Image (cartoon, coloured by chain):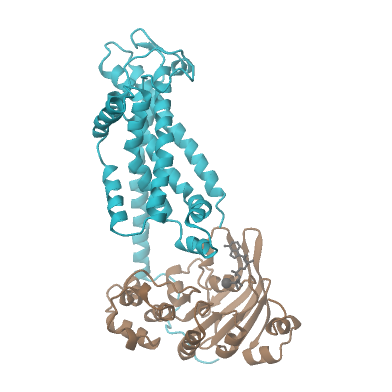
Amino acid sequence: MKPAIARSSITPRFSETPAIARRLLEERIARRLLAGVLTASLVPLFAILIYLVWQAAPMLSWGFLVESPRDGMRSGGLWPALLGTLYLVGAALAVATPVGILASVYLNEYARPGRFSRIVNLAVINLAGVPSIVHALFGLGAFVAFAGFGRSILAASLTLAVMSLPVIIASTTEALKSVPQSFREASWNLGATRWQTTRHIVLPNALPGIFTGIILMVSRTAGETAPVLFTGAVFYKSIAGGDLFAYNLLDQCMALSVHLFTVSTQVPNVPEALPYAIAVVLVATVLGVNALSIALRVYLRSRKNW
Amino acid sequence: MNCIEVDGLNLWYGAFQALRKVSVRIRARQITALIGPSGCGKSTLLRTFNRISQRDPAVRVEGSVRILGEEIFSPEVSLIALRRAVGMVFQRPNPLPISIFENVAFGLRIHEPDTPVDAAVEEALTAVGLWEDLRFRLHSPATELALEQQQRLCIARLLPLKPEIILLDEPCSALDAQATLAIEQLLGRLAAEYSIVIVTHSMAQARRVSAECFFMLLGEVVEHGPTEQLFTNPRDARTGDYIAGRFG
Ligand SMILES: Nc1ncnc2c1ncn2[C@@H]1O[C@H](COP(=O)(O)OP(=O)(O)OP(=O)(O)O)[C@@H](O)[C@H]1O
Ligand SMILES: [Mg+2]
């Protein structure tokens, strides 16, 4: 046999040396640490949820969901508030989603990259950070007074829409940026227009990411109190329990967030479980809408198969 | 002397068997080419040599692969040590998104944090013929290099670690004819010091660079022998058909 050709004569060659063992130790520490941080950040979250449900349990029932409040809001249900929140979020979503997506498409697919689009992007990011009470004031001036909608579901949901537009634009922009440039080039090279490319190639691939932004927006708007209180939500309004079409857009309405605030701070002698029950319904509404979007997102992603 | 010895290697992606009873001997300090039609399992075989393929949980392997006499599927084998000794170059040049210098130094920095790197970087870049061209712009981003330079860099990046084996998966398919020839010459020079296994779709390239050649079909190694013999006087009819361009 010829002499061995291996560089190192140490055998076994591929076993753990002390240096490797040290790096593997680091690796294990990193893994534990990361898992620990994740757990630490999940624990309070679940603790809150469990605590809420625990406290709310005596009040939770189907009747609680579909009845109107009674006895000066001390008993009965929260249907007017639940329906009001659904109307507000739904209407805001119906306005902000298409506007936000189309604006972002223009910014990313049409506008020449340069100073203008950079400034707009920066403005959008900063707008997303404007406190909601400022939006509330703007909504009061613009929609309630100037546009003449009065304090109404319309004015309130438009305010929410304006508030969430920057979030949707920013997240749509991220989603569009994550579509590989080569897809666009391939499409352009077949003679497709920008719109055709956007419509058939870019948007379908960006949809899952766009949904993430919408989920964020739903969570944020459903919980907002100040903007709707300024522009269209009332402390109490009686509507037929369980009737899905009890409001029209120019009505004032109740909202879960406002209702929670009222019951917790403005009404004496409420049962202890009531505010918690309202909070549970609010959280469940947000999670329900999110679950719907996530299901849609998973479905869209499953059709994206390469 | 063999650097890789494979016996009865079977590999499945889920239910699909991509390698069937592969048994080969690959000799050290020369270039071995792996040829065969698309989908026959060349990349899969190459990727088992440094156990990259097993990152996919759906992959199941059976059989034995010995590198420098050592069984790489045995539980004592450290993947870190194995991959350091068995380097890989991919079809698309994939420089790390850092400077040219740091690309070459990266391996040393992660494996031997206390070793000085300057001399090793110069040596590696010289070995692949990049030093003269790049010595004054070592700190510019590697991703801005021409494709051929990027591919050379990807080879240079392995050298400071003194690998035993260099695996290349269609390293020239993104390059033009001249760049391809340049890379081939580089491989020829490196073969004096390193054992090289190259997957290629180009018959001409296999013939130009390799000393020995394997022909694979549908997950099996059909024929193996000295390159010249395999091309001029194949024993198996299927090999003859393939190199004559009658299928594949
Ligand atoms: N991750 C994977 N999951 C499932 N099947 C795979 C996977 N990777 C490869 N395969 C299949 O295994 C077979 C061999 O693939 P491999 O990539 O090794 O072929 P190849 O010879 O390198 O082909 P090419 O010349 O096109 O690169 C193919 O049929 C391929 O479809
Ligand atoms: Mg391949």
Residue at 70% across / 85% down in the picture? B244
Name the residue at the top extreme: A71
- Quadrant for the N terminus of chain B, please: bottom right
Query: Which hue is chain B drawn in?
Result: brown
Q: Residue B76 at what x, y percent from top left?
A: 48, 68
Q: Is residue A138 above or below residue B99?
A: above
Q: Residue A14 at what x, y percent from top left?
A: 45, 73
Which one is in front, B65 or B247? Answer: B247
Residue at 41% across / 24% down in the picture? A281
Q: Residue B70 at what x, y percent from top left?
A: 52, 76
Name the residue at the right extreme: B237
- Quadrant for the C terminus of chain B, please: bottom right
Residue B155 visible (yes or no): yes
In cyan, which chain? A
Left or right, A77 with respect to A139, comes to right
Query: On the image, which quarter does residue A179 sit in?
Result: bottom left
Q: Quadrant of ligand 2?
A: bottom right
Q: Is residue B55 above or below residue B163?
A: above
Q: Is residue A285 above or below residue B233?
A: above
Q: Residue A11 at what x, y percent from top left?
A: 45, 78
Residue at 45% across / 72% down in the picture? B83
